[in-house]
Amino acid sequence: MKILLNNSDLNEALYDVSNLGFVPTMGSLHKGHISLIKKSLKECEKTIVSIFVNPTQFNNKYDYKKYPKNIKKDLSILHKQKVNFVYLPKKEDVYYYKRKTPIKISKDNLILCAKFRKGHFEGVLDVMDRFTKIIKPQKIYMGEKDFQQLYLVKKYIYNKYKSKIISCKTVRNKNKFALSSRNILLNKTELLKAGNIAKDLISFKKKLSNKKNLKMILSNKKKELINLYKIKVDYLELRSISNLKSSNKLKNSKLFFAYYINKIRLIDNF
Ligand code: AMP
């Protein structure tokens, strides 16, 4: 496994690689990340994993400061997985040029997390654009857990580069709770609560079929979740998986959910 600390290391290592899979991460790796890495290792000749906590996608200083870091453990996981390259850039390696026109999310796309985390996806698209330009991967592996991110990056990168975005299923723990680096910030009771919420919403979604008046049912469910679990909810919405437009049918739709346990913001979709 080669560790690439800057762009000249990277250019030297990748110059003759023609089938490269790229897994962008912010580190504090877990089984969700590993599932993306395994898929890339299986499908591509070489795999590169980046670890970079991208400052521009954080709309909240507390969240950025608290973002979990564990580089030693991450490197040992990546070594065990037999990843070919790990890219650990510094801010200057990624943001070495200023963009003439800033990336903007269109008004239609200011929904779900884009509505509640101003500037977040602009930061994500900016860093993904820079990474794709620097790394030039054939395939980029991303998780459905961050479905809106996957949707926006797919559209943006596909239009601009030849890299193909490969979507990977959400990995959950035995309590049905989606794995996330932020879970480390939750205590035992909070983790249990998050598991109960996930199980609650999975069974709620199963029972939704053939019901009329879905909007009203969802609005009531949102109130119930707030009262029952004492959580702050940003949204609970049913949207089409093909264009993320609001939907009142279950077919080809997903239930999108964002909420806080204490100060920790968590997202999931079912
Ligand atoms: P992050 O390090 O949180 O930026 O995530 C890096 C990549 O891993 C993103 O494409 C995420 O969607 C994906 N990912 C994070 N958690 C999971 C999970 N539980 N299951 C599958 N993919 C995940």
Image: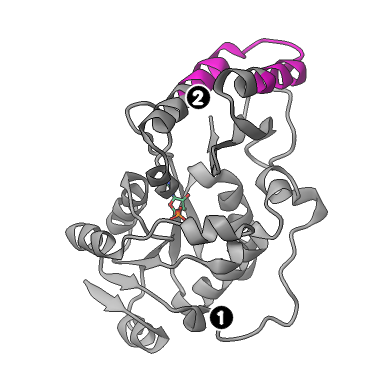
Name the residue that disc number 2 marks.
197
Label 1: which secondary element: loop
Q: Residue at x 48, y 83 (%)?
A: 93
Given the image, on which type of amino acid does mark 2 rest?
Ile
**Magenta span covers which residues?**
199-223
Badge 2: how crowded within 10 Å, few (<14), some, or many (20+)?
some
Q: Mark 1 = which residue?
A: 95
Q: Is residue 142 left or right of residue 36?
A: right
Q: Indicate if the residue with disc 1 has its beta carbon within 8 Å of ligand 1.
A: no
Expressed as whole percent of the image width and height from the top left, the position of residue 76 reads: 20, 61
Specify the quadrant of the image occupied by residue 8. bottom left
Which quadrant of the view contains residue 58? bottom right
Q: Earlier in the sequence, mark 1 or mark 2?
A: 1
Name the residue at the right extreme: 107
* Residue at x 36%, y 26% (from the top left corner): 175
Assess whether mark 2 and mark 1 are in contact (beta carbons under 8 angstroms): no
| Nearest to viewer (mark 1 / mark 2) | 2
Say what amino acid the circle numbered 1 marks.
Answer: Tyr
The local crowd at label 1, few if under 14, some if 14 to 19, many if 20 or more residues have their Cα within 10 Å, is some
User: Would residue 157 be visible to someone looking at this image?
Assistant: no
Residue 215: say if magenta: yes
Q: Main secondary structure of the magenta part?
A: helix
The residue shown at (73%, 29%) is 247
Tell me the residue at 31%/45% (across/down): 31
Horizontal arrangement in the rendering, residue 188 relative to residue 61 (left or right): left
Q: Is 127 located above or below residue 81 in the figure?
A: below
Residue 188: which disc? none
Q: What element does badge 2 sit on?
A: helix
Choose between 164 and 210: the one closer to the eye: 210
- Up-down relation of residue 91 to residue 82 (above or below): below
The percent coordinates of residue 203 (x first, y second) are: 50, 16
